Image: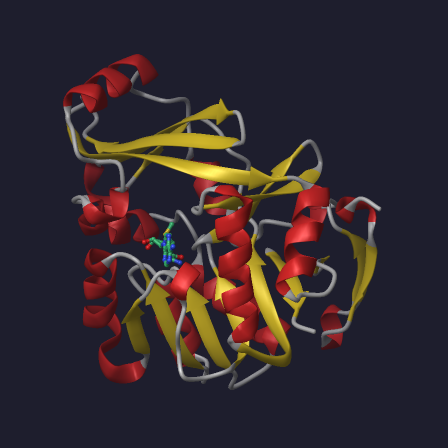
Amino acid sequence: MEHSEKTSLIDCGDLSTSCKVGELSVLNRSKVECKSMSMQPIISERSLREYIRKDLGVENPYTGNFPQFYDLLLSSGYVDHEESARQLTRLLGRSRSILEIGVGTGVLTQELIERGHQVTGIDLSEAMLQQARRRIGCHAELKLQDVCELNLDQKFDAAVSEGGVWFFVPRCNRLMLQSHLAGVGKNLQALRKVAQHLKPGGKFAISIHEANADYSMPLESGLFLTEFHRELKRGIESTFSIHTADGVILSHGVQKFATFGGAEQNRLFAAAGFGDARVVSGTDYLLLERH
Ligand SMILES: C[S@@+](CC[C@H](N)C(=O)[O-])C[C@H]1O[C@@H](n2cnc3c(N)ncnc32)[C@H](O)[C@@H]1O
């Protein structure tokens, strides 16, 4: 059966509801701000690509100068992490031990800590982690680790990927899994690592975001974020830049995401040791449970 056709009973207190994966009307409360502020791209895709073609060495945006701008993006409403932490607390319960995968600059981590959770965050980018350490200090464990080789001496109540290594985007009224990791093999290896670091019955929440679109978004301090997307054979390429109103580019990057449709997601999650995926009504998360 197609993953997107499954009906799941969600059991999480007052959120208890029954909904199909792929019913999108309930989603994106904490990720709507970006869309409401977005507008047609104010620089051309061609000029951005031309600029990037001449500027070498930006394949991984999280190791260039982008981390310096990342918090500006977040504080300008790209994602409402306060709302995310509220939803996660309702989904996962209070005072949980949480593994955050692709922790970035730690904005969600901080919100989770403030709600009484014990958080361990991992990320592949030292530049992103440095900002997270400045923000959080010793209030969370922050480790430089690739999720594919995840190796922590702890099992957690829950794991979260908030636009981190994995996230979902709506597509044709279904949810498509997008991954920073290339190919089925890497994704399976990494999902298994996550499952191995969860207690039996532990939950894994993966965030759901806006559909891919080409747009510009005003940031605080008069700068703009512009993003363009291109279909690849087995994924999506996102080209983005932070620039001034008159098109002076300050930071840019190209990211390639692997994408997985419903049936492939099912197989991946099952092979990694998770049960059925469930969208919880009124939240921006898809929830998996470790066997
Ligand atoms: C879009 S950022 C999201 C950061 C944060 N979760 C947030 O909500 O702001 C994605 C993060 O995933 C990290 N990442 C990508 N691939 C990874 C991997 N294989 N292992 C660990 N982290 C990874 C990146 O370095 C980046 O910090």
Residue 86 visible in this rendered orientation of the protein? no
Q: Could you tell me which residue is drawn at 48 percent across and 31 percent down?
A: 236
The number of discs equals 0
Residue 274 visible in this rendered orientation of the protein? yes
Q: Could you tell me which residue is drawn at 51 percent across and 58 percent down?
A: 189
**Which quadrant of the structure image shows residue 16?**
bottom right
Residue nearer the viewer, 152 or 236: 152
Quarter of the figure with the C terminus: bottom right
Tell me: 266 left or right of 203: right
**Which quadrant of the structure image shows residue 286?**
bottom right
Residue 252, image x, y percentages: 23, 34
Ligand 1 is located in which of the four quadrants? bottom left
Q: Could you tell me which residue is drawn at 42 percent across and 59 percent down?
A: 148
Residue 144, image x, y percentages: 27, 66
Q: Is residue 181 above or below residue 271?
A: above
Q: In this view, does 244 lie above or below 63?
A: above
Q: Could you tell me which residue is drawn at 80 percent across and 44 percent down?
A: 2
Tell me: 23 left or right of 190: right
Residue 41, image x, y percentages: 37, 22
Tell me: 18 left or right of 129: right
Tell me: 228 left or right of 199: left
Q: Is residue 68 above or below residue 82?
A: above
